[in-house]
Amino acid sequence: MDEPKAAKQKRTCNKKVIFLLGALFPLGVIALVTIAVVQNKPLPKNIKYGIVLDAGSSHTSVYIYEWPSEKENDTGVVQQINDCKVEGNGISSYGHEPTKAGLSLQKCMNKARQVIPEMQQKETPVYLGATAGMRLLRLNNATMAEEVLSSVENMLRSFPFDFQGARIITGQEEGAYGWITINYLLGNFIQDSGWFKYMPNFKPTGTSGALDLGGASTQITFESKKEIESQENSLHFRLYGKSYDVYTHSFLCYGKDQALRLQIANSVPTATDSILMDPCFNSGYRRNTSTSDLYSSPCISNLRISTAPSFLDVKGTGNYQLCKRNVEAIFDRTRCTYSHCSFNGIFQPTLDGTFGAFSAYYFVMDFLKLTKGEISLDKVKETVERHCSKPWDEVKKEFPKIKEKYLSEYCFSGTYILTLLEFGYGFNSENWNDIRFLGKIKDSDAGWTLGYMLNLTNMIPAELPYSPPLSHATYTGLMAAFSILLVCIILICWLTFRKPKCLHKGII
């Protein structure tokens, strides 16, 4: 029996409608995806650069940073791309030959010229911050300090960068900028803002304290939830829409190099026939020290004794316990006019939160293999004591590539770090693992230089910059998906409730 004509027309019409929908649907999807891809095509990167010179007491380092200009106010976008350690000592050592201070920077600045594209060099800011070494030189001889700064300024102006000045920063600034650096790189400033705080099981960790140890000074900085009784140790920041009350203090003369001088100067009265037996050096190690050079530092000058010999023959005995006792003697824990002090009568609130320890803290503890994972305070002490007890010949054989000056001082430095953190600041076995020894964070060196540049370039806004809850790519993708869904719903409804005219042909 032949199929009715009306049925044939209906089936033919349905095929046409389905074919039309089938053709239009992928075309619509392709069109929407194309628009989304074109709209979100990555723009050419507009990279900016910055250079900061850390003129420390023992050496100078040059750090080169980059960041995408369109994300200038985002946290964690500035990254270190290169660094260069200047040969020789710190610029403060050139007090009698200031011209050489500037010349010493030439090699590393030439390296910076090779790293930064020529077209962007004129707009690349250069900052030099001098720390405790120059602070001590200024105390000793202000004229010498100015001549050294003038020398490095003249050298830096000779390069095709945007030189922004060279200055001696205060200890408080050094501590504050170190705190800003590590929290910026860790993303702590905006981690509890925006949509993150609405995520399930979200727990804001707050900021991390900063422990910085240089050659001539040491800084401790952390956010305090308690009253800061000493205003000179109090800082207030407004960063990314949140307020922070921060405690900071810089101890000039308590960097590891000056602390070693203090320890030796305290021991001079015990010397016999110019021979000083020192428990903070490995047994078998010997060093000839000029007392005039020893007492030349403002940190030591008040310890000068008239009967001191011209030279000291320092002989190591490698005794951790005696070394610890000698080191403790340079801290004054007998006076405090506040509710709580660290040492030398300086106010310090109760330690709170986690801490990042960097600079010499990291280098010394990394040498002793004490930076990975959680290691108990007792285990750290055992490790330092074991290193101190090794004969000098054995130490040299074990580490043949390390310069003798640095290698010879690891016993003292390890003992000093333990004493400073435990006896000085009040860390103990319960909160020892709140300290993380940091070398780099996301390929950037932990230190004060990045925070210094962020502050001077105003890249950390006081208020949190507005940003929509969704990225442009996510927004476009969702719009495309929901548009397709909506079209499909409309077509289905139209086909269901309003049949095409062709379907009515031939129907009685």
Image (cartoon, rainbow, N blue to C red):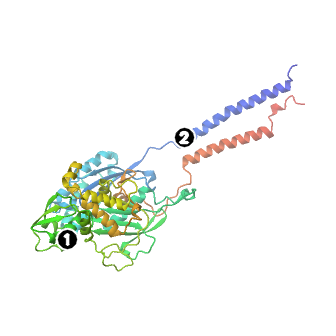
Q: Nearer the viewer, residue 438 or 506?
A: 438
- Where 312 sits versus 485, above or below? below
Residue found farthest to the top: 1
Q: Position of residue 77 (x, y in %)?
A: 43, 52
> Quick check: can you spot residue 127?
no
Amino acid carrying mark 2 in the image: Val
Q: Which mark is residue 266?
A: 1
> Tag 1: Cα neighbours inside 10 Å, few (<14), some, or many (≥20)?
some
Q: According to the image, label 2 marks what residue?
A: 37
Could you say which disc has been placed on residue 249 in the image?
none
Q: From the viewer's side, name the closer residue of 208 and 116.
A: 208
Residue 203 located left or right of residue 158: right
Instruction: Report, in whole angstroms, how far the alpha carbon at label 2 lies from the one at label 1.
Output: 71 Å
- In the rendered image, the quadrant that contains the N terminus is top right
Query: Closer to the camera, 134 or 496?
Result: 134
In this orientation, which residue lies closer to the viewer: 433 or 473? 433
The answer, for residue 22, to whether it is visible in the render is: yes
The C terminus lies in quadrant: top right
Which residue appears at 44% of the width and 62% of the height? 207
The three-letter code of the residue at mark 1 reads Asn
Q: Tell me: 22 left or right of 2.
A: left
Secondary structure at badge 1 equals: helix
First in sequence: mark 2 vs mark 1:
2
Q: Are marks 2 and 1 in contact (CB under 8 Å)?
A: no
Q: Is residue 6 left or right of residue 291?
A: right
